[in-house]
Amino acid sequence: MFETRSPEETEQLGARLGAQLTAGDLITLAGPLGGGKTCFVRGLVYGAAPDCADQVASPTYALLHQYPGHPPIYHLDCYRLRGADDARESGLLDILSGDGICLVEWPERIAAELPAERLEIRFDHLTESCRRISLFPHGRHARALAEQLRKTS
């Protein structure tokens, strides 16, 4: 568990994780609106593909943003989906086990379709600017990512 006291600290934590990510990694981001998910993603993209960080925005109205890193980074927002059927019909589920780094906001909308190996991250408001960021690794690789992030903090 981490506590960040500003958007900048949230981005910095995301950047430390992003620097570790490789093709096939799946990160889910859960929490309330305004919880810091997109801020964390901005940092994560900076850590994984610095040239793309200024392109990060909440994909709420687009469902998917793709950032052209090596590997590519896919940022899905499932908020507007009614469930896994919507994601399946739109082809979004194919991205979950693809060749890129996949970041999924509002993963509970497609929970039954999520691969077993993933790093689940939960965001909670503590105050106006302070967030609690909790890691729930699922699988060996996700545990290694979480442990490495703890060591770098």
Image (spheres, rainbow, N blue to C red):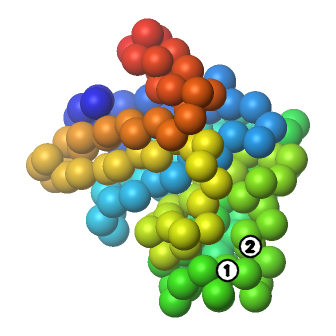
Q: Amino acid at mark 2?
A: Leu
Distance CA(mark 1)–CA(mark 2): 5 Å
Side (left or right) of 140 relative to 100: left
- Of 53 and 86, the residue lying toward us: 86
Residue 92, disc = 2
Side (left or right) of 7 relative to 54: left
Task: Point out residue 107 in the picture as x, y percentages from the top left corner.
Answer: 50, 65
Q: Determine which quarter of the picture holds residue 77.
A: bottom right
Q: How many marks?
A: 2
Q: Tag 2 or tag 1, which sits nearer the N-term?
A: 1
SS category of the residue bearing label 2: loop
Q: Residue at x 33, y 60 (%)?
A: 31
Q: Residue at x 65, y 88 (%)?
A: 86
- Of 69 and 148, the residue lying toward us: 148
Q: Is residue 150 above or below residue 33?
A: above
Dots 1, 2 in contact, CB < 8 A: yes
Side (left or right) of 131 relative to 37: left
Residue 87, disc = 1
Asked if residue 50 shows in the view, the reply is: no
Task: Point out residue 35 in the picture as x, y percentages from the top left corner.
Answer: 31, 57
Residue 123, disc = none
Q: Residue at x 24, y 51 (%)?
A: 124
